[in-house]
Amino acid sequence: MLTQISVAIIAVAFAVLVFFLIKTLKAATQSLEKVTQTLQEVQKTVDELSYEVKQTIRNTNDITVDVQHKMKQIDPVMDTVKNLGEALSEVTYAVKQVSSGMVSRFKQSRVEQKEEPRIRQEVPVTAQDRTFQSYDAVYQNTEAQEKSRSRNWLAYVDTAVSLWHSFRRQKAR
């Protein structure tokens, strides 16, 4: 009888074990089904995203080609701007040279004008001659200086006009 009770207890224990194993296997099966379903959704999403990524790459390539085309069209404009900058630099340099030349001529004429009275003062004269000399220095030199200045300004204007004409000729080329 003891063997029969032992076999009965083993059979009950085995039935309980099978019951819990079945429950565990059902739970595992449900989990695997959910994982399978999730993987299918992920696969579907990846497929959709890959299509969108491919479209984005195609659009990016089109935009790149368009930008390259437009850059090639802008190259002549950039070359023109560069040439214009060089021309303006040359004109600035020429104007600087002309203005420095004018300033040096102006200073030289002033120095010459200042030297002339010194020569006159070295010559001994009488009181009456000194009066006439001072009168001449005040009134005649003022007129001479004004004429000299007006001539200088006319020369400056002529120089500026000739520079402008040469600049226009270079620009027309």
Image (cartoon, rainbow, N blue to C red):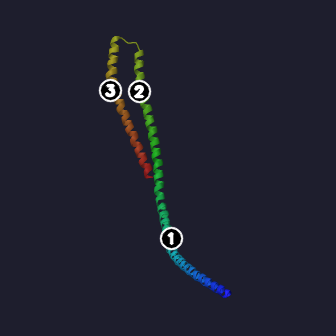
| Residue 98, x across and y down, in percent | 44, 38
Position of residue 142 measured from the top left corner of the image (x, y, whole percent): 33, 25
Could you tell me if the residues under marks 2 and 3 are in contact, i.e. CB atoms within 8 Å? no
Residue in view at x 43 percent, y 34 percent: 102
For marks 2 and 3, give the one nearer the viewer.
2
- Residue at position x 66%, y 85% in the image: 6
Residue depicted at x 45% and y 32%: 104
Q: Which residue is mark 2?
A: 110
Q: Residue flagged by tag 2: what amino acid is it?
A: Arg
Q: Are marks 1 and 2 in contact (CB under 8 Å)?
A: no
Q: Residues within 10 Å of mark 3 (few under 14, many from 20)?
A: few
Of residues 35 and 136, which is closer to you in this image?
35
Outermost residue on the right side: it is 3
Q: Is residue 23 above or below residue 112?
A: below
Give residue 53's mark: 1
Q: Position of residue 32 (x, y in %)?
A: 56, 78
Total residue callouts: 3
- The secondary structure type at the circle numbered 1 is helix
Q: Which residue is mark 3?
A: 143
With respect to residue 11, does 68 lie above or below? above
Q: Quadrant of residue 10?
A: bottom right
Of the numbered discs 1 and 3, the one sitting upstream in the chain is 1
Quadrant for the N terminus, please: bottom right
